[in-house]
Amino acid sequence: MAAALPPSTAPPLLTRRSAAGLLPFHRARRGQYAAARHGGCCARRLRAAAATAGATRGLTRRATAVAAAQGRAQAGEGAEEGSLQMVLLSTAVAVCGSFEFGTCVGYSAPAQAGIVSDIGLSNSQYGIFASVLTVGAMVGALTSGRLADTLGRKMTMRLAAIVGIFGWLAIYLAKGAAMLCLGRVLLGYCTGVLSYVVPVFISEIAPKDLRGGLAASNQLFICSGCSAAYIIGATISWRFLVVVGLVPCAFLLVGLPFIPESPRWLANIGKEKEFRASLQKLRGEKADISGEATGIIEYVESVQDLPKARIQDLFHRKNISSSFDAQVGVGLKVFQQLGGINALGFYTSYIFSSAGFSGKLGTTLIGIIQIPITLLGALLMDRSGRRTLLLVSSSGTFVGCFLTGLSFYFKAQGLYTQLVPTLALYGILAYYVAYSIGMGPVPWVIMSEIFSINMKGIAGSLVTLVSWVGSFVISYSFSFLMDWNSAGTFFLFSAASLVTVLFVARLVPETKGRTLEEIQESLMAVT
């Protein structure tokens, strides 16, 4: 990423090599002059001497290029080392939004008994309270891309945090169903915006060799926030549980002034001075950012003359690259939802109980394994690659759903009744392990990487909207599917996971170890 070292800072070894490489050339020239003076040297020797000198010059140039490349690599390593502190701080602040996302999703389960008792809601009214989060999230998803492109990544996170605070306060002060639902819709809007802008911001500030792992921390903190709501909610009242949601919003608002804005967004809106200052702050004061800055500026300039992005541009034949990116991003989110994650997430206890296993013990085991497995996926993201994790993960979710479906089939047929609870346990645990390592975090990471800077807002909003619509459809229809055929429901989920394997193998590109600009160039070449 760093630029080549200027001549004045060339390594001493390079200077000695260059000088040594020129000696044979001078000797050859002296041989030519001597031959001319004596007038008897054969042409073959002159040509051999000239060829030797040319070959030596070629070797010298290659040695110079190798040394310069080594210098750039060393400079890049120094830049990455110097920038790590600010990049990690910026990521830590951003994932407060991810933690907030998790607390919003996880709040309704532990709060149900207290809210129904204190406010006097019926189960159907509480079902509406829990589900309107998705409605607010759809609205947030629709506006997230345009907000992030217009206001900037930091300001969009700040806005989402403020909306989240008002949502939590509305729930805390609620005395009836209307106020509760208003607060829940505001929290949904907050999560819809954060689900887009957090992974995008992290991907735009992170060095290419760390981008996957840092972006995957988004999913890690979503799981952490959800687990925190479950665990703390079991010990305190539903009104005081609101504090668990307010804390990450407060941390996000306090931390944002201390981190830089996304340099790529600044470059895209033409603020070159602020862009270079932001990139320098992220890469370290002594880092040479000229190479990376030039690459970003050249790419931004290449898309500046394009017309303003519209949603229909994603599917226009003239925009083959954008259409391909949209197919990948939307496809991954569709298959993520068709794999049944939200059905299992909302109805885990019910599924365990239906299979004859303790619902409380089952959900506890899932909470124990989910966070460390998600952390493992983040660590492997930049080593194994995105495609590998997706292939392994979707294969694992296929196995998990198939085993769970088999347990319900055996139960319905009265076969191997003693084996049914064990199969259900192993199936659901296998599903969560596989999902947490790949299909959970990777689609968000790829969504934040594959779209060009001019299409990212529109395309990202579409992908996020598809995710939330899919979440609503699957979670709403799951109870009807289970009434229809419990085993068949999980066999359908397993079939969707199998199709996901084929989709990933055929269409999803590998983005590991590339800058965002390099990813765009490779996608243009493929399409």
Image: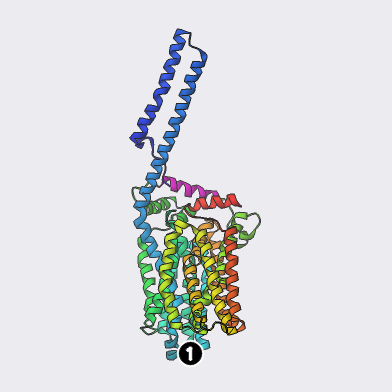
Q: Residues within 10 Å of mark 1 (few under 14, many from 20)?
A: some
The colour scheme of the drawn protein is: rainbow
How many numbered marks, from 0 up? Answer: 1
Q: Residue 98: x, y in percent? A: 43, 68
Residue 507, placed above or below residue 8: below
At 44% from the left and 65% from the top, the residue drawn is 218
Q: For residue 379, which quarter of the picture?
A: bottom left
Q: Residue 519: x, y in percent? A: 52, 52
The three-letter amino acid code for the residue at tag 1 is Leu
Report the residue marked by disc 1: 121
Q: Secondary structure at mark 1?
A: loop
Residue 410, placed above or below residue 315: below
Residue 333, placed above or below residue 40: below
Q: Residue 516: x, y in percent? A: 49, 53
Report if residue 145 is visible in the image. yes
User: Magenta span covers which residues?
Assistant: 289-304
- Closer to the camera in the image, 32 or 275: 32
Q: Residue 21: x, y in percent? A: 40, 27
At 53% from the left and 57% from the top, the residue drawn is 450
Relative side of 167 to 507, left or right: left
Q: Which secondary structure type mostly characterizes the magenta part of the structure?
A: helix
- Closer to the camera in the image, 95 or 379: 379
Q: For residue 60, which quarter of the picture?
A: top left
Residue 7, placed above or below residue 152: above
- Closer to the camera in the image, 463 or 210: 210
Relative side of 278 to 494, left or right: left
Q: For residue 466, which quarter of the picture?
A: bottom right
- Examine the structure image and report whether residue 490 is included in the region drawn in magenta: no
